[in-house]
Image: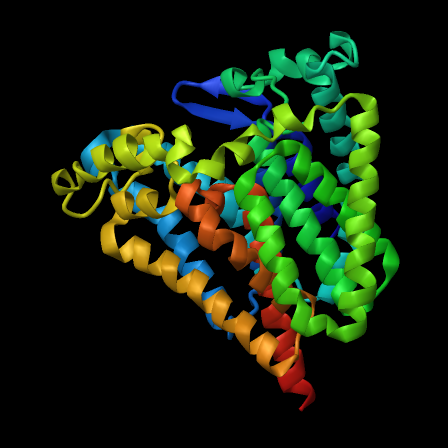
Amino acid sequence: SKMYILYFIVLILFEPYGLAIGSFNLRIADLFAFAFLFLCLFAISLRNQINKCNFLPLALLLLFASLEIFMPILGVVYFGVSSLSSSIRAITYWAPLIAFHHLYRGQYQTLLSGLEKPMIYLLVLNLIVGLSQSLIFYGVLPEYLNVKRYLLPFTIYESRYSNFTSMASGLFINTTALAVFSLLSFIYFWCHYICTRKRHYLMFGALTLLMLIVTVSRAPLIAVILILLLSLPLMGFKGVFFRLPLLVLLLLLSFVLLSELGFNSEVSFTRFTRLQGGLSEDYSFMYRVTVIWPAILAQAKNYPFGTLTNSAAVFGTIDSGYITYYMQGKVLFLSVVLSFIISLIVMGFKIILLKSYNFFTLYGFFISIFLIGGMAVANPLRNSNVIFFLCLVLFGSDNYKRRVLHEN
């Protein structure tokens, strides 16, 4: 489990760094992933036994991961050996985690406890770096305090990594990556709070919201609002009227402090204010709807079975997970993605109706709320941190279900 926690830390801190080898980017995180995978496979070979899957969302997740890994191998027919780079990337994302969870026999609560301190430290570190980036942009802090400038020579994504704006990116490759990590962290602390009612989880949840707000990323922020609304039936009267106001108060105090430091909310939140005139006022979204997506979908007839390899590598920027998977594997791939997300949503509404939940099922439901909308304008299912938490909570849910059945 210590290796597992270390792998999580490496994913957060070292993913943007490595070497470009031809068309394939070899990251520090990849080297650690292959080492972790080798150790897990070696342990599995000695044990000669793996955990079985008895949980529908997990089975669909494993089917999805299999398509991510093996479909690009078939893509060699269209695009030659270069297609294999998509398969290798999927292996580095999925294989170490799946191997570890199939091997792991301990209590999943132990894994959660082991993650808590690294989550807090990484949250505070990225919050400090992210806030300093915004304040540097507004001229409150000097330029030399931007730590990412010193790390720029070591990144393999220089064009995206060096895009310094009012939207904070922390130590991640870009604003979107920090926003996704912030959302995942919020769900982590919020689920802990709902399950335990311990106030320090509420405080850390407020910090993650603050970090999410300075990224000015709309899809994760909308997801948080929906998560809070869907939490109301689970928290009861006392939880709603005595805890949520405390969360709001913490955020308001944080905004007052940021304003005093020089944070210009009018400039930073133009991505929201411009929506007052409707979605037609959002240039980036309308450009996707009217230009990018129609142009890509028009080429679908050229690939009867889809591109098989990563369709973003074929068409360039797609900015939609749904279209990405449709173009790669047509109805087959898209139906697996939709079935997986729907299975999480169904699980979630069972939680609300029966008010029977644990951390793992609750997290799986809340992350599905983000995936529904996030997949429309991005592809969070190819974010290594999303993959990490999906594997954790779904294997954890499966483990919890098996233990309950065994005890009964």
Q: Would residue 396 be visible to someone looking at this image?
A: no
Place of residue 235 in the rendered image (x, y in percent of width and height, measured from the top left): 73, 71
Q: Give the image quarter of residue 90.
A: top left
Give the vertical position of 145 relative to 259 (above or below).
above
Q: Where does the C terminus fall, quadrant-wise?
A: bottom right
Q: Nearer the viewer, residue 175 or 36?
A: 175
Colour scheme in use? rainbow
Residue 171 placement, left or right of 63: right
As drawn, the residue found furthest toward the right would be 199
Taking the view exactly as shown, the residue that stands out farthest to the front is: 277
Residue 370 placed where, x, y %? 53, 52
Q: Going 62% across and 44% down the picture, which residue do you hit?
A: 36
Residue at image x 57%, y 56%? 367
* Residue 114 horizontal/vertical position (percent): 79, 53
**Towards the viewer: 269 or 53:** 269
Task: Determine whether 90 is above or below 47 in the image.
Answer: above
Specify the quadrant of the image occupied by residue 83. top left
Depth order, front residue of 277/182? 277
Task: Name the residue nearer the viewer: 358 or 56.
Answer: 358
Residue placed at 14% from the left, 46% from the top?
304
Q: Position of residue 232 (x, y in %)?
A: 67, 68
Which residue is located at x 45 percent, y 19 percent?
21
- Lateral position of residue 136 relative to residue 360, left or right: right
Residue 300 against residue 398 in the figure, above or below? above
